[in-house]
Amino acid sequence: MDADFRSSFVREHAQAKAHPALVLNADFRPLSYYPLSLWPWQEAVKAVFLERVTILAEYDEVVRSPSIEIRIPSVVVLKDYVKPQKRVAFTRFNLFLRDAFCCQYCGAKGDLTFDHVVPRARGGITSWENVVAACSRCNLRKGSKPLSRSGLTLRKPPRQPGAVELMNLGRKFPPGYLHQSWMDFLYWDAELDA
């Protein structure tokens, strides 16, 4: 096999991996915002052939098989509506998202842990209503002391978020890369230019 052909094939194939498809529900809204509902291009092409999605936008790049050439989908919409979950899982990620990725004592961002407002050593439980995001410094400062004796105050009381609330919070943290073809589907409630 010719070395130039081989290297160009490898380059084209590697580029195709970097073309995710935005996946929209049948109501034309993303399945999730954070993380953004993206499929690898291979999954999008497979869903097209299985007739599970409709292509709304495409990249300029194509993928080929011996008998077919198809432009890589950049936006697909599901043909069947997927009912969103109403219950929000209690996970570290969702907790940090609820607290906007900042310490609930000092407001610092980054280097986050979680803290039990009523310490477990004093009977506190691990629940939405008792756990908050905290930076390491504030978490160590509070330790197993009650909040009133720690010298810290909460920015807002912890509570269980709803699924829609978390989805809306996720919109504030867009991924590092947003393809131009996705914009019309990500911010449909933004004010339109006149």
Image (spheres, helix red, strand yellow):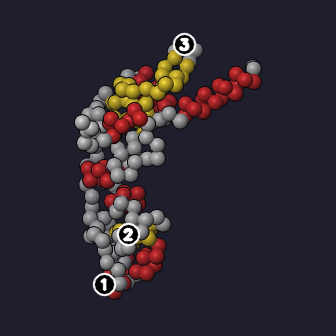
Tell me the residue at 36%/37% (across/down).
Answer: 183
Q: Measuring from the top left, give residue 48's x and y in whole percent.
A: 41, 24
- Which of label 2 and label 1 is nearer to you? 2
Q: Are marks 2 and 3 in contact (CB under 8 Å)?
A: no
First of labels 2, 3 by sequence position: 3
| Residue type pointed to by label 1 | Ser
Q: Can you name the residue that lies furthest to the front here?
A: 194
Asked if 164 appears above or below 179 in the picture, the reply is below
Residue located beneath label 1 in the image? 148
Asked if 51 appears above or below 125 in the picture, the reply is above
Whether residue 147 is visible here, answered yes or no, is yes
Asked if 70 appears above or below 117 in the picture, the reply is above
| Residue type pointed to by label 2 | Gly
Label 2 – label 1 distance at C-alpha: 18 Å
| Residue type pointed to by label 3 | Ser
Per the rendering, the mark at residue 100 is none
Label 3 – label 1 distance at C-alpha: 71 Å
First of labels 2, 1 by sequence position: 2
Q: Measuring from the top left, give residue 11's x and y in whole percent.
A: 64, 30
Q: In the picture provided, is 175 more to the left or to the right than 68?
A: left
Residue located beneath label 2 in the image? 107
Could you say whether the residue bearing mark 2 is in a helix, strand or loop?
A: loop
Other residues around mark 2 within 10 Å, as few (<14) / some (14–19) / many (≥20): some
Tell me the residue at 31%/53% (across/down).
Answer: 169
Residue 120 or 171: which is nearer the viewer? Answer: 171
- Which of label 2 and label 3 is nearer to you? 2
Q: Measuring from the top left, give residue 124's x and y in whole percent.
A: 33, 75
Q: Measuring from the top left, give residue 187's x and y in whole percent.
A: 30, 41
Per the rendering, the mark at residue 67 is 3
